[in-house]
Amino acid sequence: MRTLLILLIINTLPLFLFADAAVDTTGPTSLLYNGAEYVKQFNVTKGDPFFPASKNAGSVKYHQNWYRDIEVHYDCEDDYVLVRDMRGLLKLRLINEMLDEFFIDGHHFVKKTFNTPSGEFFELLFEGKRTLLVKWMKRLNTDTKSTDTYILKNNILLIENGKTRQVMQEKDILESAKENAKVLKKVLKDNGIRFRKDPIKASKLMIQEMETKGW
């Protein structure tokens, strides 16, 4: 009788002691498949609204659960994240309010509430004393030379001392370490990087250098 009672206690413990530690899976009843069907129409001959990725291999943190090693697409025109349904057929649009962050081919995106209460997704380039983010956007270009083709644009943001500012020129980064501006310029030169040609890579390298040196 005593042995039976002990077994009953052991079998019951996980039901209430470890309930919070449970991790949702990609089974038939998974919360991952909680979303609307993605029915957006676009002409593929003129491009697409998705963040450029070669494999679309990624992970999402959805409903406070991580779902790893899944196919992920990011519509950076409308700020939607898409996954396949459990049959691997239809794309599902995840509910933004339930989505905290995600990865696509090594690119890490996080939600920030700069412009809207529900938040928008930004690629996280660096996080330390300073935070460097990129807002990726695809828009239809309607000029006379190239009508209705998708153009990828970006907006670099630097968060420092609780303030957010846009990074448009090299000097926008150098302002954070004016006394070491020559050193930072030399770092770019030594690595063969020009801000005008690759502002994202240049910004990240300068911020990393400042953080490493403790500036």
Image (cartoon, rainbow, N blue to C red):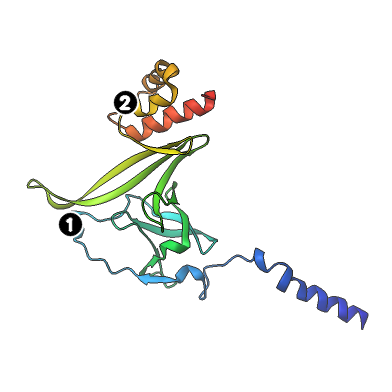
Secondary structure category for the residue under label 2? loop
Residue linked to disc 1: 45
| Identity of the residue drawn at 31% across and 32% down | 198
Circle 1 crowding by C-alpha within 10 Å: few under 14, some 14–19, many from 20:
few
Residue 20 position (above or below residue 190): below
Reading the image, the residue beneath label 2 is 194
Residue 86 percent coordinates (x, y): 45, 71
**Residue occupying the far bottom of the picture:** 1
Q: How many labels does the image show?
A: 2
Few, some or many residues within 10 Å of mark 2 (<14, 14–19, 20+): some
Q: With respect to residue 210, does 14 lie above or below?
A: below
Towards the viewer: 104 or 213: 213
Residue type, label 2: Arg
Look at label 1 and name its amino acid: Thr
Query: In x, y percent, where is residue 37?
Result: 34, 71
Residue 213 vertical placement versus 97 (above, below) = above
In the image, what residue occupies the spot 8% across and 45% down? 145
